[in-house]
């Protein structure tokens, strides 16, 4: 009788130890499965540091270019004077965001309303919005990137003559919120970017607010993706998606489809507003597959089909 009781006691001890072990193993694997959002948050302090501010950019500091290797820029007062005191996203969080790429998959998508439902809309490289594009791509924007070389330098003649400056001033007013220029990606972008910022400051243009991307934040984000097996230079769209993941509860992605046939196997142009050319620097298909993987896991919503009209 006693023996049976002892055996029972031993059994209880063994079961307790086993369940403890099981519990420890489970919690450890749960710890390993950090949400990508948390990971991004931990790596890059996006809210505070996605752009250069007087808080993160001090006179005398050295800025490393994100793309031109080995080149640096010594921060001077001419630069810091032009920067905002703090980041406009500091301490902010949005419940729903749209990240809008410029892919031709948006043509005839009818996704304009769906895109505009967001609290915060990110767009790439001064795309045409509104007018005949409104139905498919929406009209709202809160943060728009502008490439200093392919846009400001080429389309607006480097702001050297009145005509270029006037056109720039008229055009950027279509993009309220932040106009985001990567002044420290490549070295050749810095002077023109500073001229553009000086210009909008002199003209007292408040909307959009022209801001400089932070190359350190870009590099940190790129390293994050490298750890997730994306080794090429990050595209603007992927970069904006990463920022959205850090500041928004729900991330809806539109206009990303880096293939020359649509999902129904019909030929597709490159941009929704014109031909454009195939990108050699980035690896869009690989980035896209990563986003689809996250779509499967419920981390982001990638929209590739036509949107239903709101009833
Ligand atoms: C986003 O932009 C829209 C207009 O495009 C504006 O009404 C809205 O207040 C902006 N949202 C934020 C959070 O700045
Ligand atoms: C990266 O790729 C390697 C080899 O293909 C694979 O073993 C690893 O699990 C991948 N890592 C991630 C985070 O996807």
Image: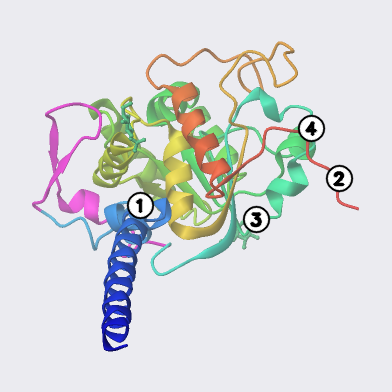
What residue is shown with label 1? 40
- The residue positioned 55% from the left and 47% from the top of the image is 300
Residue 132 circle label: 4
Residue 40 in picture, x, y percent from top left = 35, 52
Q: Which residue is mark 2?
A: 309
Q: Are marks 3 and 4 in contact (CB under 8 Å)?
A: no
Q: Is residue 69 above or below residue 171?
A: above
* Residues at marks 2 and 3, CA–CA distance in whole angstroms: 16 Å
The one of 90 and 36 positioned closer to us in this rendering: 36
Q: Are marks 2 and 3 in contact (CB under 8 Å)?
A: no
Between discs 1 and 3, the one toward the N terminus:
1
Which of pointers 2 and 3 lies earlier in the amino acid sequence? Answer: 3
Q: Looking at the image, which residue is at 21% across and 50% down?
A: 78
Residue indicated by mark 3: 118
Q: Is residue 80 magenta?
A: yes
Q: Residues within 10 Å of mark 2 (few under 14, many from 20)?
A: few
Among the two numbered marks 2 and 1 on one chain, the one whose residue lies closer to the N terminus: 1
Residue extending furthest front?
A: 1
CB of residue at label 2: within 8 Å of ligand 1? no
Q: Nearer the viewer, residue 97 or 302?
A: 302
Mark with earlier residue (4, 2): 4
Q: Position of residue 60 (x, y in %)?
A: 8, 52
Mark whose residue sits in front, 2 or 1 = 1
Mark 4: few, some, or many residues within 10 Å (few <14, many ≥20)?
few
- In the image, the segment drawn in magenta is 60-88
What secondary structure is marked by label 3?
A: loop
Depth check, mark 4 against mark 1: the one in front is 1
> What is the residue that sits farthest to the bottom in this orientation?
2
- Judge by depth and name the residue closer to the eye, 106 or 201: 106
Horizontal and vertical percent for residue 33?
37, 53
Residue 1 at what x, y percent from top left? 32, 88
């Amino acid at each position: 009788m006693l023996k049976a009781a002892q055996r029972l006691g031993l059994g209880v001890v063994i079961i307790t130890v086993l369940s403890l072990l099981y519990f420890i193993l489970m919690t450890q694997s749960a710890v390993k499965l950090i949400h990508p959002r948390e990971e991004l948050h931990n790596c890059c302090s996006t809210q505070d540091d996605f752009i250069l501010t007087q808080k993160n950019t001090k006179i005398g500091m050295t800025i490393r270019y994100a793309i031109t290797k080995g080149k640096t820029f010594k921060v001077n007062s001419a630069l810091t004077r032009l920067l905002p005191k703090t980041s406009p996203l500091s301490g902010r969080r949005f419940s729903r965001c749209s990240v809008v790429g410029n892919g031709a998959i948006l043509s005839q998508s009818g996704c304009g309303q769906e895109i505009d439902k967001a609290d915060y809309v990110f767009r790439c490289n001064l795309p045409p919005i509104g007018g005949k594009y409104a139905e498919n791509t929406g009209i709202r924007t809160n943060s728009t990137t502008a490439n200093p070389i392919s846009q400001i330098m080429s389309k607006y003649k480097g702001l050297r003559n009145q005509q270029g400056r006037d056109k720039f001033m008229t055009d950027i007013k279509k993009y309220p919120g932040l106009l985001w220029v990567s002044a420290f990606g490549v070295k050749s972008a810095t002077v023109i970017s500073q001229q553009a910022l000086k210009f909008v400051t002199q003209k007292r243009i408040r909307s959009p607010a022209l801001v400089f991307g932070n190359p350190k934040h870009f590099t940190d984000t790129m390293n994050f993706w490298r750890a997730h097996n994306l080794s090429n230079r990050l595209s603007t769209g992927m970069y904006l998606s990463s920022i959205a993941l850090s500041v928004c509860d729900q991330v809806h992605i539109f206009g990303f489809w880096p293939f020359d046939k649509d999902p129904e196997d019909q030929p597709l142009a490159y941009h929704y507003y014109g031909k454009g050319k195939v990108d050699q620097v980035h690896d869009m298909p690989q980035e896209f597959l990563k986003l689809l993987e996250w779509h499967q896991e419920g981390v982001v919503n990638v929209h590739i089909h036509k949107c239903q009209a709101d009833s």
